[in-house]
Each structure stands twice: as structure tokens, then as C-alpha cells.
Image (tube, coloured by chain):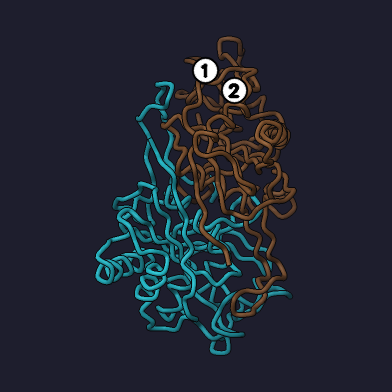
Chain colours: A cyan, B brown
Amino acid sequence: MTGEARIIPLAGLPELEAGDDLAALIAEAATRTGGFEVGDIVVIAQKAVSKVEGRVVRLEDVIPSDRAVELAGEDGDPRQVEVILRESVEVIRSRPPLVIAQTPHGFVCASAGVDASNAKGPGTVILLPLDPDASAAALRERLTELTGIAPGVIVSDSFGRAWRQGTTDVALGVAGVVAIRDLRGSRDAAGYELCSTMIAVADEVAGAAELVMGKANGIPAAIVRGVDAAGDGTAADLVMPRERDLFR
Amino acid sequence: MTGEARIIPLAGLPELEAGDDLAALIAEAATRTGGFEVGDIVVIAQKAVSKVEGRVVRLEDVIPSDRAVELAGEDGDPRQVEVILRESVEVIRSRPPLVIAQTPHGFVCASAGVDASNAKGPGTVILLPLDPDASAAALRERLTELTGIAPGVIVSDSFGRAWRQGTTDVALGVAGVVAIRDLRGSRDAAGYELCSTMIAVADEVAGAAELVMGKANGIPAAIVRGVDAAGDGTAADLVMPRERDLFR
């Protein structure tokens, strides 16, 4: 039977700069909460990861294309839209200045994940990590080196959803955890087969962590404890294969 | 600063029947975990709510329409598809036997929420509650009567998502909690305006609860403690208004 789970905010990290040892800062913050336990999952906000990886662009260095000017409309910044287009493999929907695009990772999200809020100053935008699974794996390796415990790592971001208002945090990159819990073929409590149940457990863990992180709180990470999700997932597991996607 | 949150499974409920006092069974299960605290949110699986509300249909009583036969294809049960069509106001996408439909509540989801797994026996399907907000409000009122504490209540279900694999649990009905945390106009830790941030906190709470409930565990409810989400939301807050919906 499943037991209780805990969601522990990791606070007190400084403003992050490119090249910072994010894992060391997280390990230090975790020490203040009593340290890691075996089975812990550390959820880290994408922006924190992108900042230390230097995935920041100054808009004054960007020359917008004609298409960016068009998609920006009257309310958008064509330079920011230009960055979004460069981060996109396909624009899925647009209504100026809103752009929903698919990223090279396969994610479909607003602005291809390019975000101005909480950025490194006015006129800068933050991009998604180039390879969030690799970011998660590197953080996991360094956390293991520092603490002797290998936590699961999820790099999270806030995504909007089709048909539903508001964002929920989802997993962009994972290491040492499953992304999907596949119950297909297992049986429910009444003995009937759960024929089509795949649970996006990494997304639920990311959303749970958001509840204590908050956008406005300056808490870029949290520990989720008591959720048995150890495994070998990848963010690609969470991307709907194009041939099964009814909404493209 | 936000503190730690806890997710406490409520186990040991019996198999539910129409007319059961679900709130009393939940209150009893909560007592075994130490009882409710002020600010607690109780997340209850939709199927548990639908069962006690008698929202169960026997397929042998259903005569499928021509459209249901067509949408069922070779692999589906036309009687089940007929029930799905009756529970739908609009079919959004279909690929036999899969039907994505909008329900009268405004939710867009697979099978209009009609589900065979964990049902009351072979050949039966479970429908969504007629008014999940009212279900949540009634459970909240009865829990308050029984325990002296008025917890927030969320009725949850597992929904698939466009573009992402796997389901996450979301809120179908809420009482005594916010559905959306609206940060528009507030400022982030760096002082920049979070201009477009609306967080679907009720969906994140529902997803967090799923992490300890599990489909196969026979745990139909959980307490989420330590998340400050008291308020007066409705499930309609979580439905994207049609005029803003780019994916219809």
C-alpha cells in the first residue's frame, strides 16, 4: 500500500548566474531541511537550470525576421517572437502575440518555452535547456557526488493546456525516475484490467512540487519524498508520438 | 514563505454502493490518519463519487445508434460509445474506438469521462457526476457536520492531454478551494511582473493526490495538507472559454 508523501521546498538559493554549481546550492539547501533520503525526487525549475547553463538571450542583440514581426502583432515584441521562432521546429497555432510551438525536444508549449518573467533583467529572455534530460542527469550525478545519495531529478516548467485554463508544472527532463507509470495489463482493485492506463507520474510530481515552489516565492526547487518512482525514464516518454496525436 | 506539504492517502474504504454516505467513510478513514486539520484539502476520485450517486449504466440496457456503431469501429463496444454520445455535447475528435468529447460541464476528455474500469461489474460503465461542484460542496458540508472542520474538497479524474503522453489527475469539481491561482499583475522574485501567470492549482493538487492514490490501490481519496488554497473556486474556472480556445 502506498504511504504518505511529502513535498519539501528548497529555499534560500541565491540569484543564479551562468556557470553556478546549481547542484551544490541545492544540496546545501537540502541540508537545511535534513538532507536527502533514498528515493527522494528533486524537482528543479527550468529557469534555474537554464540560467546556470547560460541559456539567456539579450533582445537588443536580436534582429527580427518579417515573420516574427507579423506574428508579434501590435502587442508583442518582434525580437522576442524571433527568439521563439529560432527555438521552434513548428508553429502549431498563433494569434498575435501568442505563439504555440513545438520545440526540438518535441514539447508543444506557449512561446516554445521562451520566457521573459524572472529573467536576468529587462530586455532578456530565457530559453529551455538544450537537452533537459542531460541537464537532469548531470544534476543527479553531481548531487550523488556531493551527498552520497542519488535522488531522482526532474527539470520542470509551467505549461498551459489545450481546453483547460491555467498552467500546471510538467517534466521537461528526468533522470533516475520513470516518466510514465504504465499500468496497461495490470488489474484494478475490483479485478478488471486497466486496459489503457498510462499515468504521467513525472508530470504529477512536477505539479506537486509547484505547490510549494510558487512562481513568486523565489523557491526554485523542492524535494518530493515518498513517491516510488525510481526508474529510467526520459522526457521523450512524455511526448505524444505524432502518429497518435489527434491534435496537430 | 511556503512550507512543506503532505499528501496522506485515505485507505480502507469499502466497495461503494449507490446511496452510501461517502463523507462518513472518508471522515472515518481520516480519523485513522489523525483526523483533519484546518486548511486540509480532501481529493476524492470521481469514480467513488459517481458510484454513491448511482451514475452507473448497464450496457445491456443500451441500444446503440447508427452513429455509435460507426464511431465504435471494429474494436469498440457500440453500446459504450452510445453512452459516451449521450454524455457529450460535442465530439471534438474521433478515431474508432477513441472518442474525445466535450461534456455538458465543458470538459474536453476521452470518452466524455465514461469509464469501464473499476466499474460495478462486467458490462457496466460509470458516468461523471451530473454536477461535480455540487458533489464537492455536498461532501464538504457533510464532512464539516461530521468532523467540525470544513476541508476543501476536490473531485478528481484522470484526463489525457493533447501532445503529451499519459494521464494526470485534474479537478472536475471543487468546494472551498480556489481552482486557479491568478498571479497576473503580481511580481516575481526579481521584481518583474508575472504578466500572464494563472496557475491551475486545483489540478496540481488533484495530480499530487493521485501520486498516493493510484489506480490499482483501492485508495479513492487523499488529504493534501499545507497547500494554502482556501477560496471559492468552481470547476468552470478551469475550462478554457471557447473564444480563447485555439484547439477546437
Tell me which residue sits at (42%, 52%) in the image: A202
- Which of the two labelled residues, at mark 2 and mark 1, occupies the earlier sequence position? 2
Q: Is residue A101 visible?
A: yes
Label placed on residue B120: 1
The verdict on a common chain for dots 2 and 1 is yes
Q: Nearer the viewer, residue B112 or B121?
A: B121
> In which quarter of the view is residue A146 placed?
bottom left
In the displayed structure, does residue A198 sit left or right of residue B143?
A: left
Residue B211 percent location from the top left of the image: 45, 44
| Position in image of residue B23 (x %, y %) | 63, 29
Vertical relation: B141 (above or below) A30: above
Using the rendered view, name the quadrant where residue A100 is placed: bottom right
Three-letter code, disc 1: Lys
Chain designation of label 1:
B
Pinpoint residue B155: horizontal percent, then vertical percent.
62, 37
Displayed quadrant of residue B100: top right
